[in-house]
Image: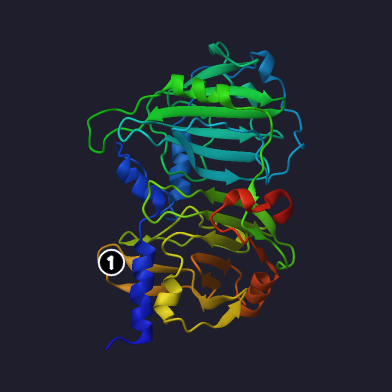
Amino acid sequence: MRTEESLRDAFEHLADQAPHPTDIRAGLQPRGPRRPRRTAAIICTAVVTASVAIAAVVVPHVISDDSGPAAQVKGNTAWSRWVDLNLPKNFKAVDQRFTANRQDYELVDTTVRTQAPFCQLQLHRNGDFDPSTIPAGSPTVPIGEHTARVVTLDGKKPFMPPPSNYSFPLSAKLRKVLAWEPIDGLWALLSCETLIPQGADIVPTAELQPAVSLAKLISPRAGRLGSPVKLGELPKGLSPQLIHYEPYDNAIPGSGEEFTALLSDGNPATGYVPPVLKPAGLVSGNPWDPARGDDLSIRYDTSKFWNQMTQIRGGKADAVIHGMKAYYTNAKITYSKKDPTKVTLSGPLNTLRLEANGVAVVISSYAAKPSMEQLKRVAASMELTKSPKDPAAWFDAATAIR
């Protein structure tokens, strides 16, 4: 007969291997060889390597009316949408990331199963992008009242920064990037490719026309970013550094609303330290995983795996907070790549997980000595939305996430 510990190991192992919506989406819309999402600590190295492979073809030089020095754009907070995307019905922003001076959106045509266009859009402000890196002589294309430059990348010099995470990495050998200012001082970089059938002997190709069509729809009117949580008491010195939002996708079985805030004291020497991988090992990962130096993460999840700890513990909670059963546990597990049945718990008990009525709120500390009492105070001081599956009714992140 299995003990509670062995059942817990088994459940956590299964939960850890459960497909993420972006992985399922990749199966529904297969493409050629793709780098893994942030599934290992070596992803930082992979991203840096990828950035070296992205290039501008000639010596950088400022060349257009839209490419003057970036102004200080402070009209909207980091936790708001700096532009409205106005996406057509066939496109969806499947992955969205927000930081102080940069926002990343992954845009996918959800109506086409193979050879569908997908795009990466980056918004940069306050000097986060240097317009002088736009190559001289780059052709122009009108984007409404603005003029965009079409930058062709051939793998010699970096231009478009790599995303902090991705579901569909850009991988065409020759890539085309639109660069323009939808608002003075706010730079947009947009690049599109074609999703191709998995295993097909087809090289991914750049798609300029979808990029131009989407760029023309972007409007300067800033939009509201919803947050399902309103932060309360936090450990001293911590503030949000990154917001990750992945919306519900009815085409993905088990998908839900996923919202994560990653907080830090700004010191990379403290907080989360990425694990060192052994050749035969694998550390599983998710788009909401912390980066080096992050001290706290708060994740809100309405996916089908919301109640995994209730199943593991049989409902025997460590506390009840906001009417939700709360479980004190560890954030991650490590398992052998050669033998996935061998599961070992990794790290200290550093996570308080609240579960009830289709919602999980997961609070993880990356302090050297995590405190359950501190996590309880963070959880108890938060205010949670009464509309878990309606982002339009969530709090305004500009005031809820401080």
- Residue 51 vertical placement versus 45 (above, below): above
Q: Quadrant of residue 181?
A: top right
Residue type marked 1: Pro
Q: Quadrant of residue 3?
A: bottom left
Q: Quadrant of the C terminus?
A: bottom right
Which residue was labeled with disc 1?
340
Residue 345 position by quadrant: bottom left
**Residue positioned 67% across, 73% down in the render:** 380
Determine crowd level at label 1: few under 14, some 14-19, many 20+ residues with C-alpha closer than 10 A. some
Give the camera-side residue of 236 and 387. 387
What residue appears at the point 39 percent right and 56 percent down from the top-left corner? 254
Q: Residue at x 67, y 58 (%)?
A: 267
Residue 36 seen in render: no
Q: Position of residue 289 (x, y in %)?
A: 51, 57
In the rendered view of the protein, which quadrant contains the N terminus?
Answer: bottom left
The relative height of residue 149 versus residue 327 in the rendered view (above or below) is above
Q: Is residue 176 left or right of residue 374?
A: left
Percent of width and height locating residue 328: 53, 78
Q: Position of residue 209 (x, y in %)?
A: 45, 19
